[in-house]
Image (spheres, rainbow, N blue to C red):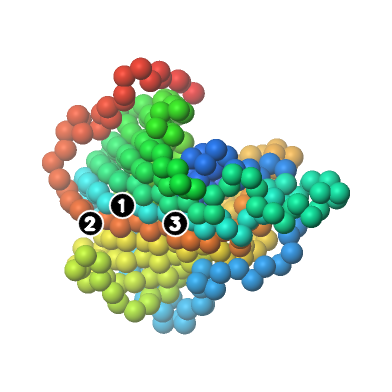
Amino acid sequence: MGQRFAGAQAPAPKKSNALRTILVITACIILVAALGAGGWIGYSKYKARQQALKGNPAAMVTPPTATQSNNALDILAKVQNAYTNLSSLTISGTSVMALDMSQLTAADLNPNAKKTAKTKKTRRPAGMPKAITNTTDVVIKLERPNLYCMEGTSKMSMGGITMSNKMAAWSSGDTNYTLMIMSGGAYKRYTAVKDRNTALMQGGQTGGLAVGIMDIFFNDSPNGMDRFIQDWGQTADDSVNGQDCYTLTGKIFGQKLEMWISKSSYMILQSQITLGAPVSNEDVDNAIDTFDTNTNQAQIAKDKAQAEQQAAMMTKLSGTLTDTYDDIQTNPPLTADDFHYQVPRGVRLVVQ
């Protein structure tokens, strides 16, 4: 079966430099929404002990049968081999986030409000939109051993307001760069960072699938999601843009994850994360144990509290994050110029 795909059972993975997998699901959904919408979803004062919520049934995953699980892991191993045996890869497509925030209340954002204001805590926060839609055009270029360029140009709509954002992460040699231009240029950040993981977290938020494909191609963390993606199972065959696909379903941070995989090439053509399922304490603990590299116990406790804040909010946020890649070129001829991202004039470089 070759190399094991992220999600197959394996020995405990080596920890990455941050809560990498949390970012895969939350950065494109919660972080992007928070940055673009003025930081309305601020968790710093939130205590995670909310009442039990049933959550969104569409975001919940039925445990697979043994046959479904074995079939899924076999397909995923072939996916791993398909990507790691390529010398270069280019992909373009679209990432669409549709986020429903209509159930959020003032208490969700500030549960520490004074008791005298209790009646106001059930009201919606002033100025918060009920929904956010973000559509990103994604382009990815990869070449061994370490060249990459991932960029996204997006339009975000919320509460009658539309804004444009641009994000990129790239390296044409030894240095990794990131770029974020938010709110049509109101916020700009261009940085040189220490490694690819940091670059993807800071500037590569162009879609959850984009980061995952880069992980597979470069074999950065072949087993890094073992404790995060659970209940993998093969589901009914389907098609994407006329291509016959295997479909797989799993659970990531408590939320439903679906993948459409080409039967002919084993390239991932589409993925969708459905939000709104409850997140268990076990999900949070696994995230911290697997991806938090801090050794300071106080910092670990702080990281866990922040993850619990996100977890408590998840059942009140519903929606989907859908990535669809309609142009995939395997082993295309690429040059160094393909990995030189054109930074807009006047944006200063900051070295971290």
Residue 4 image point, x, y percent: 38, 61
Residue 177 image point, x, y percent: 38, 29
Query: Residue sitting at 34 percent across and 27 percent down?
Result: 174
SS at badge 3: strand
Q: Are marks 2 and 1 in contact (CB under 8 Å)?
A: yes
Q: Residue furthest right?
A: 116
Against 114, residue 270 (above or below) is below
Residue 156 image point, x, y percent: 41, 45
In the rendered image, which residue does mark 3 sit on?
98
Cα distance between the residues tagged 3 and 1 = 13 Å
The crowding category of the residue bearing disc 3, from other C-alpha atoms within 10 Å (few below 14, some 14 to 19, many at least 20), is many
Q: Nearer the viewer, mark 3 or mark 2?
A: 3
In the rendered image, which residue does mark 1 sit on?
94
Left/right of residue 92 with respect to residue 23 in the rendered view? left
Res 219 visible? no
Indicate the amino acid at tag 1: Thr
Q: Are marks 3 and 1 in contact (CB under 8 Å)?
A: no
| Mark 2 or 1, nearer chain start | 1
Against 147, residue 264 (above or below) is below
SS at badge 2: strand
- Disc number at residue 326? 2
Quarter of the figure with residue 325: bottom left
Query: Residue sitting at 36 percent across and 43 percent down?
Result: 154
Left/right of residue 314 with respect to residue 335 in the rendered view? right
Q: Residue furthest left?
A: 333
